[in-house]
Image (cartoon, helix red, strand yellow):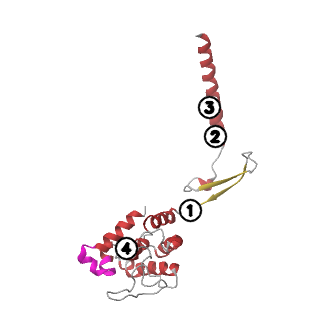
Amino acid sequence: MRKKAITALVCFQLCLILLLINLTLLSSMQTPAFAKNAPYQATTIALSSTGTGKVLGTNIEAADARELLIKSFILKFQPNSPMLPYTKAFIDAADTHNIDFRLIPAIAMCESNLGSRIPSKDSFNAWGIAVYTGQQHGKVFNDWPHAIDWVGQYIREKYYNRSITDLVEIGAIWAPPSVSKDNSWAKCVEGFMNEIR
């Protein structure tokens, strides 16, 4: 019994000493001033190929989570969408024109299943721009980045600059027949915007 008590006491003291050493080492490490208020960033650590476990260098890469959210959205609802490689274009257009980053892809989902059903393959028109009832054509864009940016600018100028930001109000102009169908366009866009989270 006495041996167990002595062993427990020694182990306790040893653990206390190790804890104090670790706390001292931890407090001596200082966080660089630039990183104190920085958002979380992924860290990549290169280890030696010989298996020694020594760190050869580090590389910190920042990523915009919005791109990942849009990519996940496209992969979930339309994995074969021709728009999949252009997730950054959605973010760039939203930032350039100061609009919600989810709006352009959500409208594209409602109007054309993210570009899968468009008037013609070379139109790059996934938003039903200038496609009127009874016609099979509409506005034609040069490519997907051009189309995405143009739509962002269009939303900014035609709606946001006029303080029209409510989806029901936008839907009444964008897709007037949807108003009599219980604002189906606005509900569709809102539903897909909520999926991009």
Q: Are marks 1 and 4 in contact (CB under 8 Å)?
A: no
Look at the numbered disc 2 and give the secondary structure of its residue: helix
Characterize the local packing of mark 3: few (<14), some (14-19) or many (20 or more) Cα atoms within 10 angstroms.
Answer: few
Point out the frontmost of discs 4 and 3: 4
Q: In the rendered structure, does residue 176 fall within the stretch colored magenta?
A: yes
Q: Is residue 163 above or below residue 45?
A: below
Residue span colored magenta: 171-183
Cα–Cα span, label 1 and label 3 = 36 Å
Point out the frontmost of discs 2 and 4: 4
Residue 176 relative to residue 21: left or right: left
Kindly identify which numbered label has been placed on residue 19: 3
Specify which label sits upstream in the sequence, 1 or 4: 1
Point out the frontmost of discs 1 and 3: 1
Point out the frontmost of discs 1 and 4: 4
Residue 164 relative to residue 63: left or right: left
* Camera-side residue of 106 and 8: 106
For label 2, the residue is: 26
In which quadrant of the rendered image does the C terminus lie? bottom left
Look at the numbered disc 1 and give the secondary structure of its residue: loop
Q: Residue furthest right?
A: 50
